[in-house]
Amino acid sequence: MITCCEKTIKIYIDEPVREVKELTGGHINRTFLVKAGSTYVLQSLNPCLYSAALKDIEHNYMQYKSACELHDAGTYEWYCPEWVKNREGNYFYMDDAGKIWRMYRYIEGSVFDKEESETGIYEVGKGLGRLHRILNECDSIREPGAFAHLHDIDYYYKKYLSLHIPDKNKRIDGLDRIIRDRIEEMRAIKVPTGSAIHADAKTGNMVFRNGRVVCFIDTDSIMQGSVYDDLADCARSCCTYENGDTDREKLISLLKGYEDGCKYRINMVNMGLLIKYIAKNRFLLGIRYYSDHLSGEGYFAERYSGQNAEKAGKLLNSFL
């Protein structure tokens, strides 16, 4: 059934539309699969994040697109999401209601199965390594202001402390206690910076074909940061248990693939730091979900009431 997106779709393409279906699973934006002459993905972008960052996001996209076209041409299958320009010749479109839209061509592939074998985990790491090799060839990756603090624990801790919560019933005493007791330990974990990264390199943002990573989607967060940020996001999504423990065998497979993908060797000191940083990654994300629950800001979209509090609990209770 054609939805209220129909007017926006016609801003981008003239093809007869056969079906529009909302895709679930996204935490920030609303995403729709559009079946027309070809298949497309249409996104309604979170205005709180995107309004002031569109120029930097487009700049980084063009940098990454050019690097993909030049990098190891023909040696392996790799795709950059192909954004579609609208009738005005722009990638982004703002409708009368102030919503920001973007469309790109659908990339056929499969998603990652968390129960994958170690071979599958190896390919995840190899895909991330390839991405970092490509990003390393970009000339001037910018830091989109809206995403600048994605891995900044000091920023989110200060934001959490500054929250004024009229409804005291929204607070969860156990989570407040965990944050208070463990924050200094987490803040003390430091990693090298200065690399171009995806900044949300979880397996949910990878496209697979024949068991191999052929594309990263949701590239809007590309910025300068630390490779540990990407490695920790990636490992959290495929190498950790529900209680927060890291599956070391899977992590070794991930890092072996990463080494083969980017030609960078990771020693035991790097691995030890990464394991600590995966914990920090979970802790920070827990603070972010909990703060969103308390403030009602709506940064993370909820599929049902209380979902952000539930996610915060799963992330933070592992630190008991």
Image (cartoon, rainbow, N blue to C red):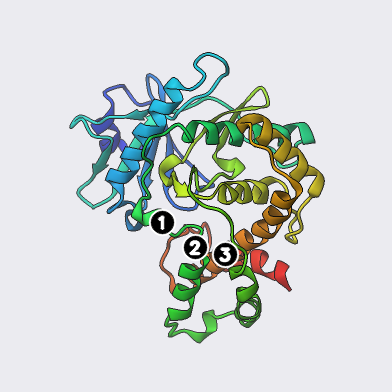
Amino acid on which disc 2 is placed:
Asp
Circle 2/circle 1 CB separation < 8 Å: yes
In-image side of 318 versus 76 (left or right)? right
Residue drawn at 43 percent across, 80 percent down:
162
Q: Earlier in the sequence, mark 1 or mark 3?
A: 1
Q: Which mark is residue 148?
A: 1
State the separation of the CA atoms marked 1 and 3: 14 Å
Which percent across, then down, holds residue 268?
76, 48
Q: Residue furthest right?
A: 249
Residue drawn at 32 percent across, 39 percent down:
58
- The picture quadrant where one finds residue 299 is bottom left
Callout 1: SS: loop
Residue drawn at 54 percent across, 40 percent down:
205
State the separation of the CA atoms marked 2 and 3: 8 Å
Question: In the rendered image, which residue does mark 2 sit on?
Answer: 152
Q: Earlier in the sequence, mark 2 or mark 3?
A: 2
